[in-house]
Image: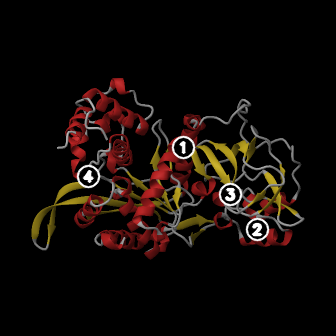
Amino acid sequence: MSPKKSKPEIREAILAALSSVAPEADPATLDPKQPLREQLDLDSMDFLNFVVALHAALGVDVPERDYPKIGTLDGSIDYVSAKLAGA
Amino acid sequence: MPSLGADMDAGTLVEWHVKPGDTVNRGDVVAVVETDKGLVEVEIWEGGVVDALVVKPGTKVPVGTVLATTRASAVPQPTAPPPEARVQASPAARQLARERGVDLAGVRGTGPLGAITRDDVEKAVRPVPPAAPAPALAPAPRPPPAPGPPPAAAQGIDAAGMRRAIAAAMARSKREIPHYYLSLDVDVGPASAWLEAENARRPVTERVLFAALLLKATALAAREVPEMNGFFAEGAFRPAAEVHLGVAISLRQGGLVAPAIHGTDRKSLVEIQADLQDLVARVRAGRLRSSEMTDPTLTVTNLGDQGVASVFGVIYPPQVALVGFGRVLERPWASAGMLGVRPVVTATLSADHRASDGHRGGLFLAALARRLQKPEEL
């Protein structure tokens, strides 16, 4: 984990995590403010795998109660940025 | 060629994982077969030494064709890919098979629901020349895959073929099975709260999905009410000795597979979660094992993620029931004279009226609901 990661770096890491879960999805088509689950057709298992991938890539542990906060791409970026900044 | 589902007539041998002279143990993956539902790793059900590989890669052969022979000692015998316990055969067929030393697992059944008849065993006794052309009843073979490395995992699934396989199984189900349907709303407040607390103290890699609780509760209910767990063959219900829940898993490109979690009733929630995760990954990669395709004794479908309130499914023959779960929703709930708001899931049962009656179905759903009230015992 590096607290010095910039937002674009975090965004890239999150998109990579999403790609590992939904390999056929095109990140360029994602609306950053719309729910990831609907745009990428993620089920509960996919979403858990996304959380696991985030943990592996960025060292951020997202508890279940915070799942709604990472429901969109923008939300995920903000959440991870805050966590890495020591919030 | 093992039958990997009620809807399978033929399969294409893609590659061998063994060669003549290799020693194999029960459960080893010996070959990869392409079916309408993707690539399947075929396990062998008897150990021994591989004698000869009869079918060449790229060849499409009907179910029941001997793929290879093995020898236990000095005597070559046909391999038996599907487990003996899953073979549906008439008592007369079993007796004849014993007399002639025929392994029923390698025989193609033409009786009701694919059961093996005495005639089928008679036919199997006649030796099949290794290079025999496919019988006329086999569907026209597709061109064999191009030589070279085996197809990439995701290419193993033929969407049109899968649609045909689902169509055949579901049409047969609705034609032959007199379904009855029951539903029960279950307060999952205690189960949700318990799981939330459990997951909060687990590392992210060991979190359990609510689906695992539903599966375990279903498996325990199936043990209590065994009329829901087994097969209907030759005009009678045959209860299964074990509970192998089939889990309906949808594919992103469309289609559906329902492979088994073996011994679901005896597994811990963590084990069920791990199995589920592994199955979903391999279903999407098109790499299931033969036993996972043939073993389910009762199937569960969970459409909660799609937001549906309830699902009344179509039974996968020759199974006799299908359990459905909708989304966990907060609903007004009256209990002990008080009105409150609780997370509630609608559990449904589609069951075969030839195998059970509504009364037993009701007991099954009641058992399922009761199990969910004590999540710590799941």
Q: Is residue B12 left or right of residue B268?
A: right
Estimate the spatial distance between the alpha carbons at disc 3 and disc 2, rounded to whole Å.
28 Å
Q: Is residue B133 left or right of residue B250?
A: right
Amino acid type indicated by mark 1? Ala
Amino acid type indicated by mark 4? Glu
Q: Is residue B279 left or right of residue A45?
A: right
Task: Determine contact: label 2, label 4, CB under 8 Å.
Answer: no
The residue drawn where x is 51% and y is 63% is B320
The residue drawn where x is 44% and y is 34% is A23
Checking the image for residue B93, the label placed there is 2
Q: Position of residue A18 (x, y in %)?
A: 37, 36
The answer to which quarter of the image holds residue B241 is bottom right
Residue at the disc numbered 4: A64
Amino acid type indicated by mark 2? Ala
Sequence-first tag of 1 and 3? 3
Sequence-first tag of 3 and 2? 3
Helix, strand or loop status at disc 4: helix
Crowding near the residue tagged with mark 1, few <14, some 14–19, many ≥20 C-alpha atoms within 10 Å: few
Residue at the disc numbered 1: B167
Q: Position of residue A61 (x, y in %)?
A: 29, 48
Helix, strand or loop status at disc 2: helix
Task: Determine contact: label 4, label 1, CB under 8 Å.
Answer: no
Checking the image for residue B115, the label placed there is none
Callout 1: residue from which chain?
B
Estimate the spatial distance between the alpha carbons at disc 1 and disc 2, rounded to whole Å.
30 Å
Instruction: Indicate the quadrant containing the C terminus of chain B: top left, top right, bottom left or bottom right.
Output: bottom left
Q: How is the image coloured?
A: secondary structure
Q: Is residue A44 left or right of residue B333?
A: right
Residue at the disc numbered 3: B28
Estimate the spatial distance between the alpha carbons at disc 4 and disc 3, rounded to whole Å.
39 Å
